């Protein structure tokens, strides 16, 4: 959120300015499906100054992940996201371990 211009982080819609493609987000309740729970899919352009807020946002659902999604070291085993800087061609997978978002080593 930018002071004086509050907005949710995953609120971008329409054409992406820097990375091409489309910005979008969807949150779905899976209560009636086999997997249960919730699913969030979001493709956004996030400024590096907002990474801390993004980390906080990713840690919230990761803290509630079902035990079947946890690895032995406590990391959330399902992908919680990917990070790609606009000039890069490759994605960095993100994981949550101990309440911290990181890139696997």
Image: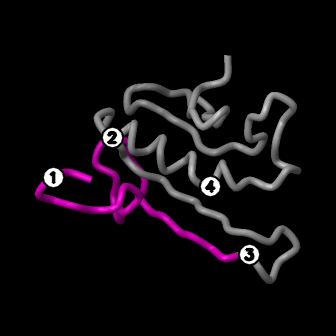
Q: Which residues are magenta?
A: 1-29
Is residue 61 shown left or right of residue 53? right
Report which residue position mark 2 lands on.
50
Is-magenta flag for residue 21? yes
Residues packed near mark 1 inside 10 Å, few (<14), some (14 to 19) or many (20 plus): few
Report which residue position mark 4 lands on.
61
Report which residue position mark 3 lands on.
30
Rendering coords of residue 57 (x, y %)? 49, 50
Residue shown at the point (36%, 63%) measured from the top left? 11
Is residue 16 shown left or right of residue 81? left
Is 100 drawn above or below residue 45 in the view shown? above
SS type, badge 3 = loop
SS type, badge 2 = helix
Is residue 4 shown left or right of residue 81? left
Disc nearer the start of the sequence (1/3): 1
Q: Are marks 3 and 4 in contact (CB under 8 Å)?
A: no
Q: Between label 2 and label 1, give the one nearer the viewer.
A: 1
The quadrant in which the C terminus is found is: top right
Real-space Cα separation, disc 3 to disc 2, in angstroms? 29 Å
Disc nearer the start of the sequence (1/4): 1
Residue 12, image quadrant: bottom left
**Frontmost residue, 52 versus 11:** 52
Mark number, residue 100: none
Report which residue position mark 1 lands on.
3
SS type, badge 1 = loop
């Amino acid at each position: 959120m930018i002071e004086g211009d509050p907005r949710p982080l995953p609120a971008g819609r329409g054409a992406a300015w820097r990375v091409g493609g489309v910005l979008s987000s969807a949150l779905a309740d899976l209560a009636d499906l086999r997997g249960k729970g919730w699913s969030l899919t979001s493709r956004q352009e996030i400024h590096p100054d907002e990474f801390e807020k993004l980390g906080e946002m990713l840690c919230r659902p990761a803290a509630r992940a079902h035990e079947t999604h946890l690895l032995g070291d406590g990391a959330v085993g399902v992908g919680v996201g990917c990070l790609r800087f606009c000039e890069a061609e490759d994605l960095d997978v993100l994981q949550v371990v101990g309440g911290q978002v990181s890139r696997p080593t």
